[in-house]
Amino acid sequence: MPFSTTIAGSLPKPVWLAEPERIFPSWRLEGAELAEAQRDATRIAVAEQLRAGIDTVTDGEQARKHFVHGFSERLEGVDAAKRQSRGIRDDRYDAVCPTVTGEVRRVRPVFGEDARFARTLTRGPLKITIPGPMTLVDTVVDEAYGKRSELAFAFAFAIRDEIADLVAAGVDVVQLDEPAFNVYFDEVAEWGIDALDTALGGARCTTAVHVCYGYGIPANVEWKSNLGDRWDQYAHVLPLLARSSVDQISIELAGSHVPPGVLELAGTKTVAVGVIDVASERVETPQDVAATIALARRHLPDERIVCSTNCGMAPMSREVAYAKLRNLAEGAQLASEGF
Ligand code: ZN
């Protein structure tokens, strides 16, 4: 059986849709024109994944400005117009974030329409991503709850309702993005896993959680350069996730200082192993990809390995991102042929 392939989530947006190579770009259009352009960009994103040979595709997050704000700002209780700067991921960098001003409730579907449209573009497996509760808490200014855990559970209930709608729209895999899990180990143990399980409770689809070292933006690259030669974050997080209800854990491995042995801490979970580095413009060869898969195989049985990207590719150039997709699929093929 060849190794199954997917991507973490986002792909670069075309220059006619949004400012290129930004994680928080301005749209080029508005209203109905914007909606049509987002659908066209989604067509391209899905087609390019299928053309590359990616098995489980995403919508490339072409209709969201940002992977966290795109969800939080559409909930009741979150004031998208009241934007304030705050330090996020333990003050790694400052970001301008929306403000929680009241009780958080999901009063309407958020990604349902995007998912239904993406569903029309492929008969194969479709994945939609949603920011996880802890990452949501860490990417808003809270003026209503006062306690991170309480706000997290409010977000978790909103996510749970959203997942039910996405499954009804025909989505096969829902992935919660939790880069904050790699930062706040104590909170992950205290309430992060419970909030994750609350969000995923009763999900009638394959569930995944993505825990990473972030987009290849300068603040993250600098942070990573200070983490030393051995990145032990997953050694804290994976044993906790192993006890959660999630089916699949998406982590990064390619071009990192993650010791591959940590994969053994994932319990019985499937692991979507990052075999493509999103912080480097260098396009991995299929042989590079196969070599990273070989590293993972020393610590995981083949049936628990899915080949993925380290993180989203939103801030990259389109040419580089699509070239990486092709070599991801080719490398997975090479590995399954017994590289
Ligand atoms: Zn990521």
Image (cartoon, rainbow, N blue to C red):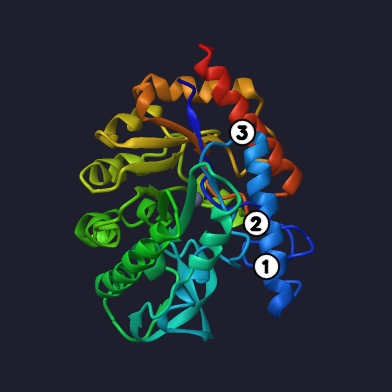
> What quarter of the picture does the C terminus occupy?
top right
Label 1, secondary structure: give it. Answer: loop
Residue ID for mark 2: 42
Left or right: residue 36 versus residue 159 is: right
Q: Amino acid at mark 1?
A: Pro
Q: Amino acid at mark 2?
A: Thr
Numbered disc in front, either 1 or 2: 2
Going 55% across and 34% down the picture, which residue do you hit?
255
> Which numbered circle lies on residue 53?
3
Rounded to the nearest whole Å, what is the CA distance between mark 3 and mark 2? 17 Å
Q: Is mark 2 within 8 Å of ligand 1?
A: no
Number of marks in picture: 3
Going 45% across and 44% down the picture, which residue do you hit?
227
Q: Can you say whether 236 is above or below 180 in the image?
A: above
Q: Residues within 10 Å of mark 3 (few under 14, many from 20)?
A: many
Going 24% across and 34% down the picture, which residue do you hit?
267
Residue ID for mark 1: 25
Q: Amino acid at mark 3?
A: Gly
Rounded to the nearest whole Å, what is the CA distance between mark 1 and mark 2? 16 Å
Disc 1 to disc 3: CB gap under 8 Å = no
Left or right: residue 5 versus residue 35 is: left
Numbered disc in front, either 1 or 3: 3
Q: Residues within 10 Å of mark 2 (few under 14, many from 20)?
A: many
Disc 1 to disc 2: CB gap under 8 Å = no
User: Is any atom of residue 26 visible in this view?
Assistant: no
Rounded to the nearest whole Å, what is the CA distance between mark 1 and mark 3? 28 Å
